[in-house]
Image (cartoon, rainbow, N blue to C red):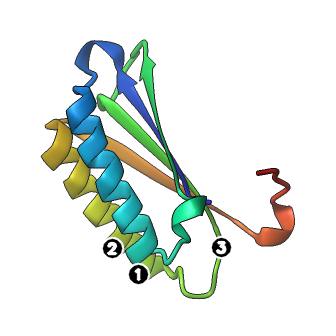
Amino acid sequence: MPNLTFHIRADRMPSDAQLGELSRDCVELCTEKLEAEIGNVHVIYSAVRHGYGQPVFAEIQYRLNAFRTAAVMDRFMESLDGAITRRTGLKARIRCFGYAASTIHARN
């Protein structure tokens, strides 16, 4: 963890090069701002049939930690919002969900 999933309108999906740049930004933000181990960061893009709202919905799932305070998460989201806009030209709705380690059951 963290897992970043981007649900992007299929008809506005950025190029592979743009998504590659955004992926690099996401890994950097997760390792630097959230202090995540690089091997635990996952970035996923999903083309969706869009109903209503912003063209990008970014969902971030992360493990709660004492150093991931509200202020840290605010800075992370601000930086992520800037990266999404800079790399794709699209406006995003961003939602972060923190989970206690005791509630996470995972493999690999």
Identified at 18% across, 44% down, the residue is: 87
Question: Where 56 falls versus 76 (above or below)?
Answer: above
Disc 1 + disc 2, Cβ < 8 Å? yes
Residue type at mark 3: give it.
Leu
User: Residue 91 at what x, y percent from top left?
Assistant: 22, 39
SS for callout 1 = helix
- Residue 71 is tagged as 1
Question: Where 103 falls versus 24 (above or below)?
Answer: below
Residue type at mark 1: give it.
Ala
The Cα atoms of the two marked residues, 1 and 3, are separated by 13 Å
The residue wearing badge 3 is 64
Identified at 20% across, 56% down, the residue is: 82
24 and 5: which one is in front? 24
Disc 2 + disc 3, Cβ < 8 Å? no
Neighbor class of circle 1 (other Cα within 10 Å; few <14, some 14-19, many 20+) is: few
Question: Where 74 falls versus 89 (above or below)?
Answer: below
Residue type at mark 2: give it.
Arg
User: Residue 33 at what x, y percent from top left?
Assistant: 40, 76
The number of numbered badges drawn on the structure is 3
Quick check: 29 left or right of 99? left
39 and 47: which one is in front? 39
User: Residue 67 at what x, y percent from top left?
Assistant: 55, 87
SS for callout 2 = helix
The Cα atoms of the two marked residues, 2 and 3, are separated by 16 Å
Quick check: 12 left or right of 59? left
Quarter of the image that includes the N terminus: bottom right
- Residue 75 is tagged as 2
SS for callout 3 = loop
Question: Where 25 falls versus 51 (above or below)?
Answer: below
User: Residue 50 at what x, y percent from top left?
Assistant: 39, 16
Earlier-in-chain disc, 1 versus 3:
3
Earlier-in-chain disc, 2 versus 3:
3
